[in-house]
Amino acid sequence: MSAIHDFLSSIPHLDVATTIVDIALVYFLVYRAMLLMRGTRALQMLVGVVIVLALFFVSQEDYLNLQTMNWVLDKFVSSFIVILIILFQPDIRRALSEMGKNPLFLASSRRRGPSLYDEIIRGVTRLASKHIGALIVIERNADLSAFMEDAIPLDMKVTSDALFAVFIPSHENPLHDGAVIVRQGRISHAGCFLPLTDSPKVDKSLGTRHRAAIGLTEGTDAVVIVVSEETGLISLAIHSELRRGLDANSLREELMQLFGPHAKETDG
């Protein structure tokens, strides 16, 4: 066996092929990691980590000789792996979960149909007319799997009737308590609980649904539509901002700007 190994190692073309495969695998893994972090604050934290590492190297004696800063950053770098695991723990969990469900990272064949947003608008306006509270999340780039773990899986077509049925307020309807998440053109989960914002800038009069909508959009690029049970008003949350008092036309304009053919892709 060792003779065969020595023979194969002596072939230069095999070394080149191995190097190409090695680089391609690393590139693919980095690319998939960037896709998983796209639209979340993990990418911003990664930039911060890179800046800290750059400061560590330039503060060394061979460069700027900033001894105090280098000493502090040296303690940080010595625990670098542990710090990374703590910072990116939710993203690591999502990545491993995604790898387990889809080892080859194959793209899903599902796509949003042309009537998806019309159905959402019809459902939302119908709920608003009846003063039925609702919280509808539309997933974009950021993976929202962490908010589906304790929710109720549905995997059903998005229709106005389905949205109306989900949010009918009744103790016999466990689906209405929480948010609905729309993923890849289908209602993926219902009864999802979202993080509440703790921003002091948020209007004190806003209820739990609105605070949950803002809270989710603080850390992801998701779009959240809120229907107020008290007032029947329709709101839309995106990038920590809440746009209130929408009607069917203005909601359609907002959704077309975000998801239409000429929409600009933005990261949170």
Image (cartoon, rainbow, N blue to C red):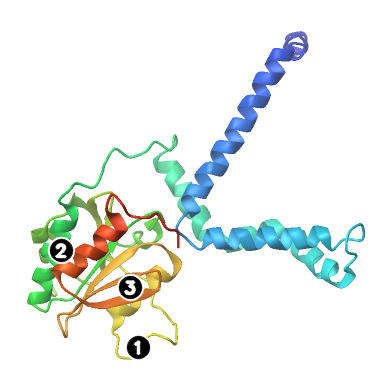
Q: Amino acid at mark 1?
A: Asp
Q: Which residue is mark 1?
A: 203
What is the x, y in percent for residue 123? 12, 64
**Toward the viewer: 14 or 151?**
14
Residue 116 against residue 147 in the figure, above or below: above
Q: Residues within 10 Å of mark 1 (few under 14, many from 20)?
A: few
* Element under disc 1: loop
Residue to which mark 3 is pinned: 213
In this rendering, the answer to whether 131 lies above or below 50 is below
Task: Please report the residue visible at 27 percent of the width from the left and 53 percent of the height from the top.
Answer: 260
Residue shown at 74%/14% (left/top)? 12
Q: Nearer the viewer's eye, disc 2 or disc 3?
A: 2
Type of the residue with mark 3? Ala
In this picture, residue 99 sits left or right of residue 110: right
Residue 256, by quadrant, is bottom left
What separation in Å lies between label 1 and label 2 (alpha carbons)?
25 Å
Picture quadrant of residue 225: bottom left
Q: Position of residue 127 (x, y in %)?
A: 11, 71
